[in-house]
Amino acid sequence: MSNLAQLQIPDIIYSWIKNFFGKHYHRIVNAAELHTTTAGNRIFKYADDTYLVIPATNSSSCLTEITYIEALAASNKLQLNSAKSKEIIFSARGKPGKTIHHYRV
């Protein structure tokens, strides 16, 4: 509840969330604090999936981003499911330098 308590929300909303979600509250707040460590990289979240998108110009930041996400998960007593993690590389036809690395974490 300490992460939730740091959000700028009215006390009545805090109490409602605490009562409604019980022990499941941490997933909402943990997703809210997830961000990239490198400018230009993006994180997209949908339900319980997280997508890390890294443009080719930042491909060297992949390990740093994954390490950050793993550390954040561990600090919140969560674990990444690496069996579900995938790397997808998109390239524009005939346009070198337009590669985008897309990671599902």
Image (cartoon, rainbow, N blue to C red):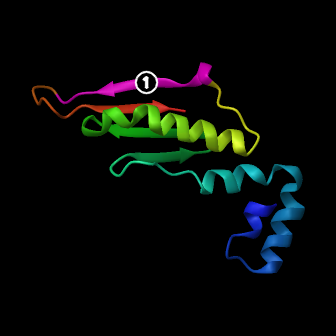
The C terminus sits in image quarter? top right
**Residue 51 in magenta stretch:** no
| Picture residue at 41% right of the left edge, 47% below the top | 42
Residue sitting at the far left? 94
Q: Residue placed at 36% from the left, 38% from the top?
A: 54
Could you say which is closer to the camera, residue 80 or residue 37? Answer: 37
Residue under the point 57% across and 40% down: 69
Task: Give the residue furthest to the top.
Answer: 83
- The reply to whether residue 97 is visible in this rendering is yes
Percent of width and height locating residue 24: 82, 49
Q: Quadrant of the N terminus?
A: bottom right
Q: Give how far across and how far down residue 81 sits, in percent.
A: 65, 26
Q: Position of residue 74 (x, y in %)?
A: 70, 39
Position above or below: 2 against 28: below
Number of numbered discs on residues? 1
Residue type at mark 1: give it: Glu
Q: Position of residue 30 (x, y in %)?
A: 67, 51
- Residue for point 71% across, 76% down: 9
Q: Is residue 4 above or below residue 59?
A: below
Q: Which residue is mark 1?
A: 87
86 within the magenta span: yes
Q: Which residues are magenta?
A: 82-92
The residue tagged with tag 1: helix, strand or loop? strand
Q: Nearer the viewer, residue 65 or 4?
A: 65
The picture quadrant where one finds residue 90 is: top left
Label 1 crowd bin: few (<14), some (14–19), many (20+), radius 10 Å: few
Q: Is residue 25 left or right of residue 98?
A: right
